[in-house]
Amino acid sequence: MFDLGRWIGRVPFAWQFRLRVRGRDRVPLSGGVVVVANHSSMSDGPILFGVLPRRVTFLIKQEMFAGVVGTLLRKIGQIPVNRSGADRTALTSALSVLKAGGVVGIFPEGTRGEGDVSSAQNGAAWLAKTSGAVVLPVACRGTYRAKGWRPRVDVLIGEPFHLPEGKGRAALGVATEQVRDRLATLVAELDGQRASEGRR
């Protein structure tokens, strides 16, 4: 089923968009990884699931786990999240994946927006600090209000990094801000590259 999920993330979107992915070599080949990405479209998650070289378990809003889509998401191991508050069950499940050396994907903004990472929640930082996993920032641009025939979608994978040590709310706040800053910087870098090519 995982292969089917990757096929869905690759083939249909390859017809819909012209995908360009850079930085695949920056993805750690082993060990726990928290992938953090900006979020501006429903297409972002499936695209990243399809193009990243390792299997990724995404935290996805529980409203998506209905009908045929919900069945598929469960079959490929994705984790439903209740966004009304801190979902301890989802975080515990994600933590288990990381401690087993897997990859967890999360959109720190918590919901779709313009993808500029202006607001970042602390779940990604908590997972990385608690598990000892590295954080891997990923920027995705071109899916937001995409128009025209097969518009260009760019995915830029940044350098993995470790969060600073420290316990308590203050340390978690510092780590959350670092995640936000690193991701925002990567998104800005990708925006600059696209602007130089006449894209938005």
Image (cartoon, rainbow, N blue to C red):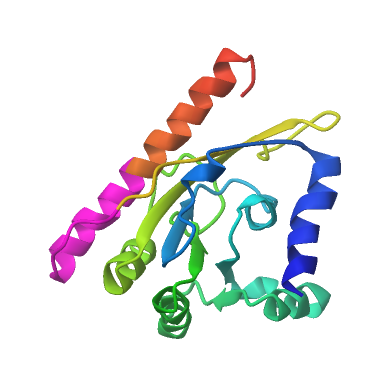
Q: Quadrant of the N terminus?
A: bottom right
Residue at horizontal 50%, vertical 66%? Answer: 103
Q: Quadrant of the C terminus?
A: top right
Residue at horizontal 69%, vertical 80%? Answer: 74
Residue 12, image x and y in percent? 84, 51
Measured along the vertical axis of the image, is residue 195 above or below residue 90?
above
User: For this view, does 36 lie left or right of residue 73?
Assistant: left
Residue at horizontal 82%, vertical 33%? Answer: 150
Residue at horizontal 68%, vertical 51%? Answer: 47
Residue 84, image x and y in percent? 47, 74
Q: Magenta stretch: residue 23 in it?
A: no
Q: Main secondary structure of the magenta part?
A: helix
User: For this view, does 152 lie left or right of residue 119?
Assistant: right
User: For this view, does 141 lie left or right of residue 146?
Assistant: left
Residue 121, image x and y in percent? 37, 59
Q: Nearer the viewer, residue 162 or 69?
A: 162
Q: Nearer the viewer, residue 153 or 42?
A: 153
Measured along the vertical axis of the image, is residue 194 above or below residue 5?
above
Part of the protein shown in magenta: 162-181
Measured along the vertical axis of the image, is residue 158 above or below residue 108?
above
Q: Nearer the viewer, residue 77 or 70?
A: 77
Q: How many marks?
A: 0
- State the residue lying farthest toward the front: 29
Measured along the vertical axis of the image, is residue 50 above or below residue 79?
above
Residue 191, image x and y in percent? 52, 27
Q: Quadrant of residue 79?
A: bottom right
Residue 121 showing in the rendered view = no
Residue 32 showing in the rendered view = yes
User: For this view, does 103 lie left or right of residue 130?
Assistant: right
